[in-house]
Amino acid sequence: MTDAGPNDTLRVTVAPDGAIVASGDIDVAGGPVLEAVLLEQEGQIDADETIVVDLTEVTFIDSSGLRSLLSASRRAGERSAKVVLRSPSSSVRRLLEITGTTAQFRIEDSDSA
Amino acid sequence: MSPVAVGGPVVVQVPAEASMARLVRLAASSLAAMASMDVDDIEDVKIVVSEVIAALIEHGDGHDITIKLELEGEGMSIRGITDAQSFVADSADLALSSTVLAAIASEHAIEHAEGKLLIVAAYSPHLASDG
Amino acid sequence: MADAGPTGNSSERAAHDAANLERFTRWRATGDLALRDSLIVDYQWIAVRAARRFADRGEPYDDLYQVASLGLLKAVERFDPEVGSSFLAFAMPTVVGEIRRHFRDHTWSVRVPRRAKDLKGALTAAINELSQELGRAPQVDEIAERLRVDPETVLETMEASAAYRTSSLDVPASEQPSALQAALATNDLDLRTMVDRGAIRQLLAELPGRERKILYLRFFEQMSQAEIAAQVGTSQVHVGRLLQSSLAKLRANLDPDDLD
């Protein structure tokens, strides 16, 4: 399943292992796209399952992008689950650090998966 | 390469649409590159610009947004303005955006007056060595 | 005489470097050219290594080696052991700088706008290389020169590439530049030109627990010395002294091989 138009700057797909793969810019335009896919996926998984968001191909993220991840994290918390961020780049990590939101997620680097 | 002299501000006026954020980021990163900022500073400029335009899109009335980018000394000022009949300053998304701006921009301010929402930020490059 | 570099482990290399510092002092004091030349001979491997690294860019190795040797001579003449404790840290950027100047002056390439897609891998590699060589994040025109494309193509490729920062130390909690950066910038030319931030993190991990904690509180939490003293349970004066000695240890121990 892909959520994207031909010219969209964020493509969100679901990988065979259920990970949500974001590719492109997670900004004021991309954030809602990611949020929509997250909501749909959450409706399909078991209550306490983790959601994995693969950020390897993320080219840009700002606070409006972060919000989509934070609301997913909040919803996961209500289910006693966590959101896993896979391969966040140093830019993503730094955004988490400056907003103090690192602890809201579980970070998974590609070599520790 | 020494910085390219730019004789005045770069002004971009765009519809208040989310897809415009990237366009304005590109303009800002081009200008930052002309000012010989390094790649980390260019990333930061993009974030500052993106925060400004996102807030204007989300809190304005939906009319055109004007972004003014100006090289000042070693850094860049980013000013954005749009119509906004009303403005609620106390929202979680603005708080998050402000946190990011506080960490990355050297100064920033959000003002609402006379039916306009104005967001300004100043960006200063990191300390450079004589590379 | 080595052409691959001095052998031995890092503490032997550090000792070797330290012994040479004395020779630098004497050469500067006496102007004895034989001393200078003996230093050049000992450090010739730096020129060889630098020349080799740039050898696949279409310039003959012999030319590069000559340019690198000139750079080495300049480094030997300029290095002041009073200011810096590691000649290797000082020399490598000087030598690499000469080679870069050579490329800029003696080669001209047609700048072809290549499709952004083809360049992503090359971009990351170029940024990493340049960061190491320059000791700072590169500028767009420097990347463009390295990749032999125009600056606009570099910007486009950056847009299409995963967002990475070159410096993991840059997590400013306030509008001040990070305090560690400020210390690096003002205190020691060597650190500023040779920073390998991975190496610093590694060295931080090797400091005794209390010193590491104090450095961390000062530079990452940006606490004042008084606050640190209160937290750690000692006097402010003692915190100041520990900071000084920890920084000195970091400078002395940065491994020359991390420059590559």
Image: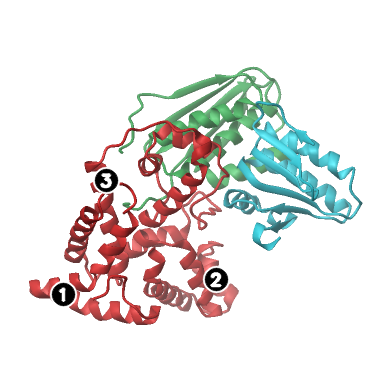
Between marks 2 and 1 in the image, the one whose residue lies nearer the viewer: 1
Camera-side residue of C112 and B104 = C112
Q: Which chain is red?
A: C
What residue sits right under mark 3 in the picture?
C103
What residue sits right under mark 2 in the picture?
C228
Circle 1 Cα neighbour tier, 10 Å, few/some/many (<14 / 14–19 / ≥20):
few
Tag 1 subunit: C
Secondary structure under badge 2? helix
Secondary structure under badge 1? helix
Query: Which comes sooner in the sequence, label 2 or label 1?
Result: 1
Tag 2 subunit: C
What residue sits right under mark 1 in the picture?
C38
Query: Which comes sooner in the sequence, label 3 or label 1?
Result: 1
Q: CA distance from mark 2 to mark 1?
A: 48 Å
In this rendering, position of residue C33 left or right of residue A14: left
Q: Residue at x 31, y 38 (%)?
A: B1
Amino acid type for the residue under numbered disc 1: Ser
Q: Which chain is cyan?
A: A
Camera-side residue of C144 and A35 = C144
Q: Residue at x 24, y 53 (%)?
A: C98
